[in-house]
Image (cartoon, helix red, strand yellow):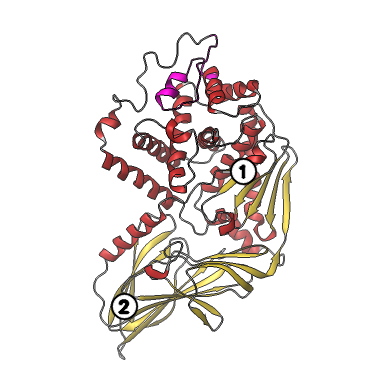
Amino acid sequence: MTRLRAAALLAIVALLAALTAYASSETPSTTGSARIAVRIEVYDTGNATVSITFSGTGSANLWITLPKFERIRVCEARGSYKLLNESIGAYFYVNSSVLLEAAGDGQYSVTLCYDFPYAVLMYENRGWFMSPLLLASPEAQLTVHVKIPFLERVTFESPRSTGTVDGYRVYNLVKTSGALIEGRVLVEFDSKQKVSSRETRDPEYNIAVEYPQLYAGIAARTLEIARRSYAVLEEMSGVRPPEVRFRFYLPEQSMGGLQALGFVRGEDVNVGGRGPIMLNLALIRYAPGYHETTVIHEMVHVFLGAAGVAANENTRWFHEGMAQYISILVAREIGVNVTDYESSLEKASRTALQVVSGAPGRYLERWPSSEEDAGLAYALSYYVLSNISSRYGGEAYIAKLFSALKKRGKVDSTRSIVLAMSEAAGENLAPLFRHWGFQGVTDWSGPSAARDASEGTTFPGSADDGLAAVLTLLGLAIGFAAYLVDQRVRRELEVYREKWRIEAATQSSPRG
């Protein structure tokens, strides 16, 4: 089964290792013992309170990650303490040093508290919990206690619980704990509470959103983004899918976990774009911008299906490149700021081109199976579509390309894609694609084909490219790794503070 947009959460290990190394290098020595105990108490709404207790003897200078946008309260203190926050580049977190001095009895104990909205996400009789990011001083013993009152049966957890104390499941977050995501506790479970689904729709464009009833805010936002984007996509593509349906799902391991923000099944694309767009409910905890671009990205797949572009291993590069490129165009048009996102994509795609020695075709004509290789494939797909589209008029070229695709009927191979792209450009693009390493292409023989795209052109990624002359292989590897880390930082999971949270706090309907 083909899934479009199964985008990996890239380089999380590298990011967390970098944060740990940074914070550790800044931590002075600690005298005596030091312990950090985290308690997370989840309420019936799925929101939680986090309490972090630093305790020990003597003095200590410890550090831990704390959220930027939640008010940190000192709930209890014995001895003296001081908090020093320093940015670590992550969207939602700061690195907080905690300076501690014992009281007269030689001991200290300081408890910091903060609210943690959307700690648990729920749908039907299933629940999904993920802790905040909890990276801390390696010299301190760190334990995490989690209480979920409506938990009935655990079906997956990372790391494994070491036991239960007073209704709290206990987790050890040392590096050897085997956590799926370092610094996070994940729990998937059967729930005693049942959260039913609801639907909201826009009759003008026949857009529907199915969602768990607790999360009306993200559903309303999804519908608004889709409605505004639909008008732009319809004008750009000249097609009108019979229905655009969104369906939220929990980020469970059986659904790909946190490795996909959303997807459309290939078989649904292949019947004219019918079938639901699946959206990861974890988007409610992502930084601003990712929800919007994910919704648009997935809608592009549906519009391509309605235009007759099949979804298979041979066409996936085109689907993904178009979805990335068009989502930026549409987001900008509906007022979403994607400047940084676009800039990072451009840099990454050019670096990715150098990593594959200027021949993306050898990498893309059959989509790679591993998530690590898929990350590179996404960047290369964007490069191909962005490079050609920007040459031939940007949005105007995309409109011509949709027209050419529709005229061809069923588009199910790289060969038919390149012929349509050539027709839209008014030039034979086959030589360029051959230069890029694509094998299954034929020359376009349209009315303007006498001059092809290779005449008088320095091919992107050729020996004349300044980037190729300057960057060494090591530099390329470092550059691409830096991009992956940057993307992980921008996708740093935590609470998306907007009207969803306000709505959840004020909603009067029963929960669960």
In the rendered image, is residue 308 in sight? yes
From the viewer's side, name the closer residue of 73 and 184: 184
From the viewer's side, name the closer residue of 267 and 282: 267
Residue displayed at 61% across by 58% down: 250
Q: Is residue 418 shown left or right of residue 87?
A: right
Residue at disc 1, secondary structure? strand
| Residue 190 spot, x, y in % from top left | 64, 68
In the rendered image, is residue 251 in sight? no
Magenta-colored span: 424-447
Residue at disc 2, secondary structure? strand
Please identify the residue farthest to the right as the structure is shown.
203
Is mark 1 in CB contact (under 8 Å) with mark 2?
no
| Residue 355 spot, x, y in % from top left | 34, 37
Residue displayed at 49% across by 59% down: 494
Against 434, is 78 above or below? below
Q: Which mark lies nearer to you, 1 or 2?
A: 1
Q: Is residue 238 shown left or right of residue 50?
A: right
Q: Label 1 is placed on what type of residue?
A: Val
- Which circle's residue, 1 or 2, is located before the other in the chain? 2
Q: Which residue is mark 2?
A: 100
Q: Quadrant of residue 454?
A: top left
Against 23, is 11 above or below? above
